[in-house]
Amino acid sequence: MTSQQIRVKRLNIDYPETRRDDVIDDYHGVKVEDPYRWLEEVPNPEVQEWIDEQNKLTESVLRSYSGWDVGPEVIHRCI
């Protein structure tokens, strides 16, 4: 054992629902599924709502760890 032990906190995370579309591209005979292409339309209100829900989840998970005083400004600096 090392002098430091890593504590792992198991979380029961309820992820927001993410829509999957039936989008398939054909690149020179190779079919590639892209079910999340709709997320590329960032100005779309539905995409903004999805982003907001993901951000809420991220903040709640980070806040569950002691010693993490995380606000939106900290997260924005990281990305």
Image (cartoon, rainbow, N blue to C red):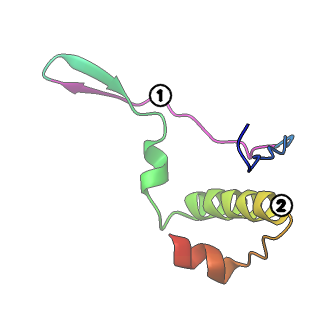
Amino acid bearing label 1: Asp
Total count of labels = 2
The residue shown at (59%, 64%) is 48
Measuring from the top left, give residue 35's x and y in whole percent.
47, 34
**Residue that lies at the very extreme toward the bottom in this rendered image:** 73
Q: Which residue is mark 2?
A: 65
The residue under label 1 is 22
Mark with earlier residue (1, 2):
1
Highlighted magenta segment, given as a residue range: 14-27
Q: Residue at x 28, y 19 (%)?
A: 31
Q: Secondary structure at mark 1?
A: loop
**Mark 2: amino acid:** Tyr
- The answer to which quarter of the image holds residue 70 is bottom right
Q: Nearer the viewer, mark 1 or mark 2?
A: 2
Q: Position of residue 42 (x, y in %)?
A: 47, 63
In the rendered structure, the answer to whether residue 56 lies left or right of residue 37 reads right
